[in-house]
Image: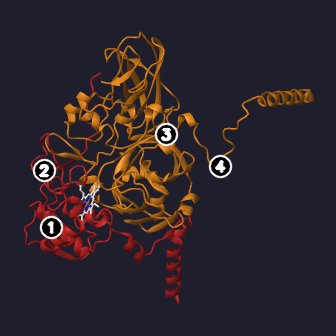
Amino acid sequence: MFRPVLKIALLLCAATAFAQTKYPGVGKPAAADRVKAADKTVMADGRGLPAGKGNVETGRGLYKTHCAECHNEAGEGRDKQWPALVGGTGTLATKAAKKTVGSYWPYATTVWDTISRSMPYNNPGTLKPDEVYAITAFVLHLNNIVPASQELDEKSLPQVKMPNRDGFIPTVHPDVKAKR
Amino acid sequence: MADRRSFLGLAAVLTACTKSSKAPSVVEQSMAPYGERAAAETNILRTATERTGSIGVGSSTTPLQELHGVITPSALHFERHHAGIPKIDPAKHTLLVHGLVAQPMEFTLDDLKRLPAVTRTHFIECSGNGGGELRGVAGATVEKSHGLLSCSEWTGVPLKFLLEQAGVKPEAKWVIAEGADACRMARSIPMAKCMEDALVVYGQNGEALRPGQGYPLRLLLPGFEGNSSVKWLDRLHVTEEPAQSNQETAHYTDLLPNGKARQFSFVMDTNSVITRPSGGQKIAGGAGFVEISGIAWTGNGKIKRVEVSTDGGKTWIDAALEEPVLSRSLVRFRAPWVWDGKDAVIQSRATDETGYLQPTRDEIVEARGMNSQYHYHGVKPWVVKADGSVTNV
Ligand code: HEC
């Protein structure tokens, strides 16, 4: 007798929890599948990466088909038209600093995420996870970060150590002192 | 008494009517459903630049030297896009709030408009504004040197309300904001800013947002670098860590001479520039009184003081700040000047409420080197020549 009453009371509590916010009735609770479909966040530690895999060799072919038109055969870019995806290693502390995936980006997950969400530029979001792993492996290989034999998946990608992994510092504000 | 007054009023109206019937007989423009500018003013335009071989990666700059007051007309607000402007059906657009929350929530625009709204005036400045000045390519006009800066009256809902509605968990430290443009631009925002003064806005200068400003919904982070005020906002992901997205690692990080880069350097530093007389303009009519006028702004809060020099920085006088002086808004300053008709170098420098003084270019280069192309905020001198023309130094 007591148990069902308690159960109903608990259920009622859950149902009214939403109504007890400061602005009851505004917005609707989002179901788990709705959130799952929309959530494309990839964190630097690999959380959010979908299951899948691809290797440098597969990536080479896919890159030729989907990317070379703009970023050029070996990722060298096209001057003032499309950015280079390679080069610049060792230049960051010089006057000729060149920031690329290879020289500047701190996380391999960001390479995967950039390609997955925004490339190819004129057809973004169309590559399948396996294709993105393969193309990422190829772009990292172009930068001598992984060997030609490399295969990447959701476990190994976050383990790739980028050359400039420790190149970022928190901002102290303000940092410039003016003399009156 | 009352009768006599209304009679006089009627007489005045009749006189006015009689007079205006003698006015030009050609009706230039009748009532229009949406207003146009005067024909003589239509040459005041933004300058749009595509930066890659693919359409949609580029910017358009605000002609600040042509504007009055502090509000930028919506049609002249600067733009910086990384994947063009998406077409969005407002009836289908929603904002999803999820992650470290008690209850993931989804809001339609109608939902958002039911919540208590606020209207606030804030500038948005691209953190790349003035990058050319740092590199030593001094802009010939204010638009060229500072045009990635605009100021609007924004209307929307404090982001805090939405986060509270979903119930943020105590371990949450960041909110990843994502837009519905083709590149699904994403930026991680510290929770403290989200709870302090961040807004989710649908209104700009009394109207709906312009498509180039994120229609139908954008994030507005007062005083933060423009890129973080994510346009076409449709997802807020509450997390413990930042995502380390493309825009917050590969771009919008400030490379220092030692090869290290400052990251999450959101706050736009204290800045000012004279807009009149300024580069490209001409003082007509020779020596005599000229009002010096310009704009000042800071991500730190309120501008407290603006000083103006007309002798290349040897002496300075305090300019008047036009009320109201609002936090993280443009402020208009004005200073009287009796020009002797000779060559002169004029410039302004601002101090904010924290006491921070706007530095010179040399002081910025000394602290940050030349590779840090973002957050430039140096004093901008203009040369007034004896013939009245004004150029960059
Ligand atoms: C139609 C031309 C085009 C194609 C095809 C294309 N891209 Fe891009 N890519 C661009 C443009 C333009 C940018 C610059 C975007 C910006 O500045 O916001 C870019 C930027 C990038 C970046 C970021 C570079 C940086 O330093 O920020 C990466 C990585 C990238 N592309 C990888 C790829 C890959 C991999 C492919 C193939 C799957 C690809 N792109 C296909 C045009 C293209």
**Marking on residue B72:** 3
Q: Which color was chain A given?
A: red
**Marking on residue B33:** 4
Q: Is residue A133 above or below residue B147?
A: below
Give me the chain letter of mark 3. B
Please tell me whether mark 2 or mark 4 is closer to you in this view. Answer: 4
Give me the chain letter of mark 1. A
Q: Which residue is mark 2?
A: A88
Q: Do the residues indicated by labels 3 and 2 lie within the same chain of the protein?
A: no
Please tell me which residue is depicted at 23% across the width and 62% down the height of the picture. A69
Q: Secondary structure at mark 4?
A: loop
Give me the chain letter of mark 2. A
Specify the quadrant of the image occupied by residue B39: top right
Q: Do the residues indicated by labels 1 and 3 lie within the same chain of the protein?
A: no
Q: Amino acid at mark 1?
A: Phe
> Is there any visible trace of residue B391 in the rendered image?
yes
Please tell me which residue is depicted at 23% across the width and 70% down the height of the picture. A132
**Marking on residue B180:** none
Asked whether disc 4 touches disc 1, contact meaning CB atoms under 8 Å apart, the reply is no
Residue situated in front as seen by the camera: B246 or B10: B10
Please tell me which residue is depicted at 14% across the width and 59% down the height of the picture. A162
Q: Which residue is mark 1?
A: A138
Q: Is residue B106 above or below residue B158?
A: below
Residue situated in front as seen by the camera: A118 or B196: A118
Q: Which color was chain B given?
A: orange
Distance between the Cα atoms at labels 4 and 3? 22 Å
N-terminal-most mark, 4 or 3 = 4
Asked whether disc 3 touches disc 2, contact meaning CB atoms under 8 Å apart, the reply is no
Distance between the Cα atoms at labels 2 and 4? 55 Å
